[in-house]
Image: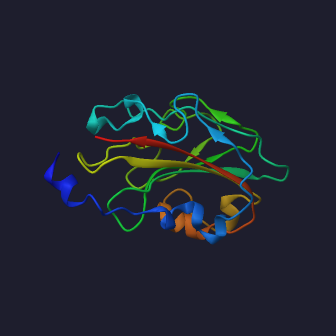
Amino acid sequence: MSLMGTLLKNRRAGEPALAWNQQALAGPDTLEVSSPAFADGTAMGREYAGKLVGGRELSPPLAWSAAPAGTAELLLVVEDIDAPMRKPVVHCLALVPPTFSDLPAGALNAPANTEGVRLLRSTMKRGYMGPAPIKGHGPHRYVFQVFALGASATASGATLASARPRALLRALHGPVLARGRFTGTYER
């Protein structure tokens, strides 16, 4: 076990700071989100982990139920709620056409992402950032959240190209027509 992981063992961002709990992103929990690569609440394969920890940093395949009528676009947010920080680390932020109900593996990797998907800035870069928790810190939960937005994110006045993830999430405002979440774990 690493000394840093041991020292930070009890420090975690936690569920309350998750995008899911922002008032502006509240809505009916009617989207079913899943992955054919791992079950909800179970370990993600090494290929989805960050390159710094020996992974391929490949975004996992994802699927969700159809968005309700009136959805302008889908917002996909991936956050590590066990990061030893005040707020969860945003591992991916993307806008997806409302007609999509799944993404293949690698679809969220920049620069060769899936056509129609707009990759926004995450905590460290644009596109998917694989798990790379501190060794010895324990399991980290990566929450994949899908929000069916009733208005385009650009209609919220957000500057999509350069906005920091938390600023972008704060700029979004209703309505959220449906939402769903799915969790994968990773530990070193």
Position of 84 with respect to 113 (left or right) is left
The mark total stands at: 0
- In the current view of this chain or complex, which residue is farthest to the left? 3
Vertical placement of 93 versus 50: above or below? below
Which residue is nearer to you in this view: 183 or 147?
Answer: 183
Residue displayed at 27% across by 51% down: 137
The x, y position of residue 106, in whole percent, is 50, 31
Could you say where residue 41 lies in the image, as x and y percent from the top left? Answer: 51, 42
Residue 110 shows in this picture: no
What color scheme is it?
A: rainbow
Image quarter in which the N terminus is found? top left
Question: Is residue 157 at all visible to an observer of this figure?
Answer: yes
Q: Position of residue 18 (x, y in %)?
A: 51, 62
Who's the residue at 27% across and 38% down the image?
52
Question: Is residue 153 shown above or below 45?
Answer: below
**Residue 102 vs residue 90: left or right?**
right
Q: Quadrant of the C terminus?
A: top left
> Going 71% across and 58% down the picture, which residue do you hit?
152
Q: In the displayed structure, does residue 179 sit left or right of residue 139?
A: right
Q: Residue at x 43, y 57 (%)?
A: 81
The location of residue 4, given as percent across then percent down, is 18, 55
Q: Is residue 173 left or right of residue 43?
A: right
Q: Quadrant of residue 118?
A: top right
Q: Is residue 7 above or below residue 103?
A: below
